[in-house]
Amino acid sequence: MQFANPMIDPFGRTISYLRVSVTDRCDFRCVYCMAEDMAFLPKKDLLTLEELERLCTVFIEKGVRKLRLSGGEPLVRKNIMHLVRELSRHLKSGALEELTLTTNGSQLARFADELVDCGVRRINVSLDTPDTDKFHSITRWGHLDKVMAGIDAAQAAGIKVKLNAVALKGFNDREIPDMMRWAHGRGMDLTLIETMPMGEIDGDRTDQYMPLSLMRAELERSFTLKDIPYKTGGPARYVEVTETGGRLGFITPMTHNFCESCNRVRLTCTGTLYMCLGQEDAADLRAPLRASEGNDLVSNAIDEAIGRKPKGHDFVIDRRTNRPSVSRHMSVTGGSGASASTRRPYSSFGCPSARASIFWPIALPLLMALSVIDVFDPEPTGTALLLSPNLRGALYMIVAMVGFAFNDAITKHSSTSMSMAQVMLVRGIFASALIAVLAWRQGALSSPRLALHPLIALRALAEAGGTLSFLLALARLPLANVSAVMQALPLAVTMGAALFFGEGVGWRRWLAVATGFVGVMIVVRPGFAGFSPYSLLALTSVACCMVRDLVTKKIPAEIPTFLVSTTTAMIITILGGLLLVPMGGWSPMSGVDLVLLVAAAVLVLIGYQFVILSMRTGDVSFIAPYRYTALLWSMLLGFVAFGDIPDSAMLLGSAVIVASGLYTFYRERVVGRPRNAVESTGPAMEPDGI
């Protein structure tokens, strides 16, 4: 069927799927969905069933081909079958391809036969555990026997049942294999869902959250999972389980989003249209609906709302942000299986247009950085006549931060499909090979015995510890958040340089660096919620990197920079290999994954090389603040490649960070004493008061 004005959002996605929450009420109180003492909407605020049917009809006339009823629990709304029967006429006319619903199953035994009569052929049943006691614990008010009776009735009536289970760490993660065998044995697909940060609940979502990338890796120890192109119109990615012959779906709003193919909008029982599950922006359709007996006003309101549909959402679950990403509960806009289109950018690699949008931002800085390598070689001559050692060191540090920011983006994407140990190993192999080749071309490998110097070993171990801590934090926290935490490093390095190297740091410089740290705190906002354990991992990385940078300054000048880089990369690679089995084993890699990790290896090479050059060129206390630029590159990457717009706190904090670095630059160029053109062999002291 052709539609005169199909709904197409600003990103070219055709909207053909409408989820309608017919009520926010439910006869369960699932711990991940709502609080036990929920305050529901007064009945006077709800649309009537006739108004819901009218709105649904307008959407169908505008191109919706699939309509799913949800809640709350849709079957607890009084006279709900009247709405289902009215909507079924669109199935008979061919305007609607599928009418389905998501239910907790408690009322299915009453309505299964009537649903079939209305053309419902497929339903989703939310069932998180087959254990009676656990079921009662997680639903608070639910009874498993009623759900099982409902499933039996639905299958007996000829309805195809798919089970949805929210994976909860420490609760049902060990039951998933048996649950999958049971579901497949009864001819039902099983879909696993990551919990989403929606609405205030009684528990801690950080304790509940279970990344499905880890769940899949665990299942692959016992089962053969084969990716298949099967689709139901929703966000699940399916695999076929060879041992059971059934299908297993993964809905991963947190670790691997599906924004690039989002074709859904959500209508609440009050007539509010949410264009994205994870954003607060919404459109009121109740007012235009009631303002006229015709549908022109509401149709125009829908068009205006679709024009504001965002690229994705900003779901985050960690202890620092231990609050919902959106204030409304899941029951307001729809239950399990909700298509949360997250805004964590790096999982957009699967979309060709998104892949192109990120490769250009990667390629251009990469070419710029490689050009800088040609100009600023390890033994600078002409550059020493143009820039002081401190300014060259600052430039090296900025280039290093560009390489690391793009490497972090690729690494975060890779963490959705493989363990961080595997990322370290694969990326490390290519990085080690590239660095070794460059070291050989530079003649840095002519004296391999120098690699045994104890300071090189200490630096490499500190780098490996910092890398592992950072990657573990990166897998669980947003890129910009991890980068923000890492901005504590310049302050730590400046303090270490003053304490251990005796570098002169005047009160103005201390004030500038401290101001930069205040900017970091504005970005991180610890006053609103404490740091998550993963933020502590990032701070552990800060401590390791401080040791690395201070040790780098003391490595003898006769040891080539490339030899230091080669040794470090090899030790990190070895660590990745040693941790591969404990951290989940080897996961299959696609060609795109391999290409991205090779690119990451090049970026790591750039970062390592220029950090070493930076720390060996100028005063550590002067160079350290330029690490703050890593946060700016991370923010810029998100904006240019994915349309992420920083909030006011991020912008304010970043401005303070940049201001501190610019002031330090000003003091060096205008107030600081002139430097010799030739690099000094030791740390130069700054004049008093700088």
Image (tube, rainbow, N blue to C red):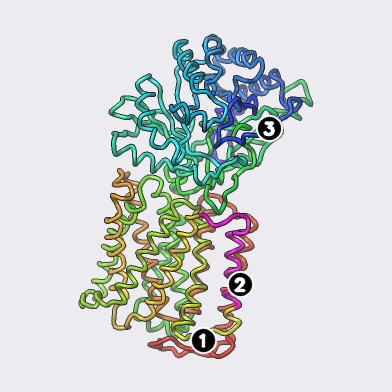
Residue range (magenta): 511-532
Q: Which residue is mark 2?
A: 515
Q: Amino acid at mark 1?
A: Gly
The image's mark for residue 268 is none
- Choose top left, top right, bottom left or bottom right for residue 19: top right
Q: Amino acid at mark 3?
A: Thr
Residue ID at (68%, 32%): 272
Q: Amino acid at mark 2?
A: Thr
Residue at mark 1 to residue at mark 2: CA–CA distance = 18 Å
Q: Position of residue 145 (x, y in %)?
A: 49, 19
Is residue 520 one of those drawn in magenta? yes
Which element is circle 2 on?
helix
Q: Which residue is mark 3?
A: 272
**How many residues crowd mark 3 within 10 Å: few (<14), some (14–19), many (20+)?**
some
Residue 158 in the figure: left or right of residue 556: right
Frontmost of labels 3 and 1 is 1
Q: Residue furthest right?
A: 291
Q: Which residue is mark 1?
A: 504
Residue at mark 2 to residue at mark 3: CA–CA distance = 44 Å
Residue ID at (60%, 15%): 84
* Among the two numbered marks 1 and 2 on one chain, the one whose residue lies closer to the N terminus: 1
* Among the two numbered marks 3 and 1 on one chain, the one whose residue lies closer to the N terminus: 3
